[in-house]
Image (cartoon, helix red, strand yellow):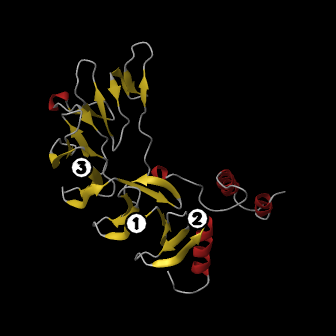
Amino acid sequence: MNHFETALDLRKGADPDLVERIELALDTITRFTRGGDWGPYPRTRDEILGRTEPPRPIRDERSGLWGYVGAVAPRYAQAQPFADGLAWVRRPESPAWELIDLTGEVVIDASSGYRAAERFADGLAWVSRDEAGGWYAIDRQNRLIVPGGFEDAKPFHHGLALIRRGGWGAIDRHGRVVVQPRFRGFLTPLVSGGPIEGFTDEGLAVVDVGERFGVVDRNGQMIVEPVHVAVVIHPVAFLIADQYGLWGALDREGKMLIELKYKEQTDVLDELDRLLTDGRPVL
């Protein structure tokens, strides 16, 4: 007899309907617990927010055309995945992209002449009438939000987007350049995973000036000068490496925290853990 049955056995005089409801509830809880641990079962962000998975693009083998599983019949020469409830598609008879919603209704038609288009994010999408460049951002109503004609651009994330004009920089939703386009790239390695392209959720990005790396924040302030062979973002520090392959760490103000003397990143992480747990307020 398990502990659930024992508990119910102690309630033999209880209302049978109540006992049945308790049994059902306990069975449900049991299905969503792992290894005997109690607590909420693991859920994705979309599950927590009640979001359902959008229909996926699928190609019809007979016609060669694209549609969306269970939502839109195959009728497109090209079809991008849905993002923010919208997807860019191109019909066989047109060189231009059009925007549709989850029901297949056209939101922005092909007469806008967009030869290239990127997914919507933060309510904006980068589009171009020139396949070789000339990117600018529009909203869902096809209104111009960020002009500029950039050579390249990445989707917005937390109000910022990477743009290229000679070098890479960053721009906000109002068209203000917050990081001047002078970097070779934005590729941000994380201790917890990655790398990611652009800024972390806390607004930090690793920038490349040509085989030397630093850290810039979302306001364009250089937190770590780009003089290091490698930089990895830690939740409370920055791991750095020199030309000899030795690793150390800086604090969040860019000051030396752990000397460059370790051959492995893991040794620096162990030292950071020690500093975090020994009670000294060094971080």
**Residue 202 seen anywhere in this rendered image of the structure:** no
Q: How far separated are the C-alphas under marks 1 and 2?
A: 18 Å
Mark 1 residue type: Val
Tell me residue 97's x, y (percent): 24, 30
The residue depicted at 54 percent of the width and 53 percent of the height is: 43
Q: Name the residue under label 2.
A: 265
Query: Which of the two residues, 68 or 202, is positioned nearer the viewer here?
Result: 202
The quadrant holding residue 93 is top left
Secondary structure beneath dot 2 equals: helix
Q: Along the polypeptide, which appears first: circle 1 or circle 3?
A: 3
Residue 166: assigned label = 3
x, y (%) of residue 191?
Answer: 53, 62
User: Which of label 1 and label 3 is nearer to you?
Assistant: 1
Q: Which residue is at a point 43% across and 75% down the rendered structure image?
A: 252
Mark 1 or 2: in front is 1
What amino acid is labelled 3 in the image? Gly
- The single residue placed furthest to the top in the displayed view is 62
Residue extending farthest bottom: 280
Picture residue at 22% right of the left edge, 27% below the top: 96
Whichever of labels 2 and 3 marks the residue nearer the N terminus, that label is: 3
Q: Can residue 220 be seen in this view?
A: yes
Q: Do the residues labelled 1 and 3 touch (CB within 8 Å)?
A: no
Tell me the residue that label 1 is attached to: 227
**Residue ranking furthest to the right:** 1
Q: What element carries label 1?
A: strand
- Secondary structure under badge 3? loop
Task: Kindly report the distance in space between the C-alpha atoms of the residues bearing marks 2 and 3.
Answer: 34 Å
